[in-house]
Amino acid sequence: MLPSSPRTHSRNSSAVSAASFHLREPSEQVEPEATFGNRGCKIFALVYLVGCILVSAFYVIAYGKNQHAYFYTEEVWVPGTVTNQVPLKPKIELFADQPYTEWISQRWTYFNSNFSDWPVLPEYVDAIQQLAAGTVNGVAGVWVLTRSKLYFGQNISAITSARIQFVPISSLLSLEVKAHSRIATTPDGRLYLFTPSNVTLLDCTPQATEYCDIVAFTSDTSIITSVYSLTFSESTNTLWAGTDAGLFYATLSTDNRLNVTLSNTVQDPVQTLAWRPSLASPSNPQPRPFIFASSDGVKLVKQRCHRRQVACEDPFGLLVVGTERRLYFYDGSMWWFEWVSVWRNGKGGLVDGPPTSLVFAPTTGELFVSNNVSLTRVNVDYTFDRIGPLQGLPYNQINTLLFSDYTVVYPPVGAWQERVGGASGTVWVGTAKGYALYDVGNQTFRGYFYGRRWHSGESILGLAGCCGGQGVVVLSDQGISVVEAEEWTLQQKAAHYQAMLQRHTRPPGLVADCSLTDYIPSTCTPQTNDNDGLWTSLLVVAESCRYHVTKDPQAQANAWALFKGMKFLNNVTGIHGLMARSVVTTNVSVSGDMWYNSTAIPGWLWKGDTSSDEVAGHMFAYPLVHDLVASSQDHKSEVSGLVDSIVGYIKNNSYHLIDVTNHSTTWGVWAPHPLNFELSRADQHGINALQILSYLLSAYHLTGKMEYLDAWKELFNNGTLGDVPTHYGLNIINQKITFPRDNNFSDDELAFLPYFVYFYSLKGLEAKVRAAYSTLLGDMLTASIDRTWRYARLERSSVWAAIYSYATGAKDPSLIEDLVWNLRTWPLELIEWGTQNSHRLDITFNPEQDRNFQANTQSVRVLPANERTQLRWNGNPFQLDSDASSSETDPGAWLMPYWFARWLKLL
């Protein structure tokens, strides 16, 4: 029996290298040149030796004695070895549960939809043209410009339950708002409204008599039909406007008159504008390069601005103007431009296409230019860098950009990782299909957000900062979404999923998916499922490990209650050793065949044709319930008796699971002849052999009955069962099927769960049994799981990583990183939102055909879990597209690996 704390081991831990020494006889003479020669050399050698010792000691303190093997203070048996070594506890923590960024999204739509849990925007807030962050009377919010009205949105948050309040500013001030208008805010709380017919300046500071006061007004814009972009230059108090008639600028006279002037330099239609303040200022005295103009042209300088100086040689800052053919720059005294590429004839400029949006990163001074092809970064030294799919851009067709001071928090997992770059903010990239986040400091993308999990509609049309700098309001073609960052730990995430568990539990103690009404989680109605036992088993293991780690009696009670539900599946059939796929009460309507009235427990229906999936789940959960949860010998006997019943029933029926029909179930076959000689079961040849060997060993481990160990030997060895060759030990080595058309990800689950049972049972055997079978057990089993892991690790699965670590003792950095990455990126909402990724440009398509005989439907690199649909580990993590379903998956696929890893002290 396994002691209460988990054990790890390394296949290399028993390797001892022998050194060869030459022992000199006392009479032998030492030649002078064989000595160090002089005192200086001796001192050097001593210093060198001490240095080596100090470096080695530092490495051990920082990284541990063996990066791949951390031993605990209990006997550890390694397959293929016999050892009495007493291992030591690790000296360092493998992983510290530091806060990282989780994104919370609240979606709003223009109209009632199938997602009735989403609030609907008021009828008067329709056809939003633009969003802009701002303040009114000192209260932060977001300006909302529609085709006919101007509103100020307050109480904006994705986290709190408060609803957005829309203050009708244009109605209160009798402002005329037209289509194709734009707004711009100033740092001191003012707002410019620029329409095709007039320009209005509003004072929205706390000194205003109403929400806002009209400060100035002009109607000198009659030649303009459409206003595309506005930006405000603080250094000169100038509003710049990009319009269909060219570039305009508006200044405020001393008598509060707005003067609007057409630029002599840029008279082509202007799509987008951006301005940045001076990079050199008394508040930023560090030297940094920046562009400025002088009488003899553009120069690049690196200048220190002393604190005593009021201004330095970058007084204006920099204005950037994007037109269809040119990207203009203006530094207050001089204009210059760079060409925009012409796509149709291949004439290349420094920007791939007509700029659609411009934004500065004030933390670095870098300019970001978007277009329909790529993203361009203009560095402060005036070098242009292209950011395309090869640099991680998920999708082009970029509509809008926004800079946010918030930097995505993703702390390093272990001491082996390099620290992330400085917190330099994030550029939000809004495209025709969702939005992406670009980490300015680390020059990498930190996620792609597309679909109903994150926003309504398809195309992202606008972005505005909100929520105290922690979030962004996203404007789409069907509404808005408030996306807010919170910093969570994995422990907080575990509590989040734990709270879901209650609504996913149904009588008689089973965990199930929920059907939802209009995608509303509160309408969760647990449904019957052909794999009720398998999905419940994951929560049994999760709660068992949680109880062991936390000693929370509620976890123990939960684990035992769910175990009772699994036992009910065994009892309801009336056949000892045969579990049902699922059960419902007789008053519940069911579809399909193979449902039977229970004679053992009247009032219940049970589903037959139980598969090997169900057996794998039952056999996975019972050993940990026995060792970690059962509080008395009677409880332990209850668990071991159930294992005895199941395995004995299969063994006594010639390794078939016999249904109530007196025939084998479709998938309940572990017998030598069909596994070794029937082509139709070629893909079960190894995996079913692994399963039955693990079940027999577990039954021996928990019951002590030699019949199970004898049966194990009979199947494992190169012998026969009757006249049929067995050699199951050979079968298991290559159990993972790699043929693309039969690469079944469900089989990964049906292999790793028995791998755990196998290794867990091996570690629980008596020392003399381990010694007798160590070589026989270890070589083939280790070869099998190592080969499987070489393929499965590409999935970056938290649960496969944890089980592999338990089985082999591996704790290499990439394994821990993948485990944590998968747990961190798992979506907070477990609703089956449809996802689409096949349009993405940052992925490499797998040219191999999948199980549906289709090629280029899977990615080579697995995407983060919150960018795909897969919510269970029997699904394909490389699948790119999926349809939506108004249902919610239970949280077992996350809770099980989290608490399992906590039990193993990986987290």
Image (cartoon, rainbow, N blue to C red):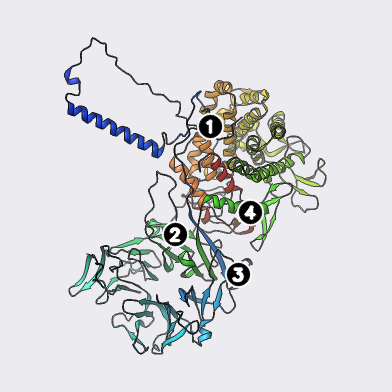
In the structure shown, which secondary structural element does the residue marked by tag 4 occupy? helix
Mark closer to the chain start, 3 or 1: 3
**Residue carrying label 4:** 500
Mark closer to the chain start, 1 or 2: 2
282 or 170, nearer to the observer: 282
The answer to whether the residue labelled 4 contacts the one labelled 1, judged by CB atoms less than 8 Å apart, is no
One can see residue 883 in this view = yes
Q: Residue at x 58, y 59 (%)?
A: 833
Q: CA distance from mark 1 to mark 2?
A: 39 Å
Q: CA distance from mark 2 to mark 3?
A: 29 Å
Label 2 sits on what residue type?
A: Pro
Q: CA distance from mark 4 to mark 2?
A: 32 Å
**Image position of 182 (left or right of 19):** right
Please name which of the two marks, 4 or 1, marks the residue nearer to the observer. 4
**Residue carrying label 3:** 119
Mark closer to the chain start, 4 or 2: 2
Label 1 sits on what residue type?
A: Ile
Local packing at callout 4 (Cα closer than 10 Å; few below 14, some 14-19, many 20+) is: some
Residue 218 on image: x %, y %: 40, 89
The disc label shown at residue 394, or none = 2
**Residue carrying label 1:** 733
Label 3 sits on what residue type?
A: Pro
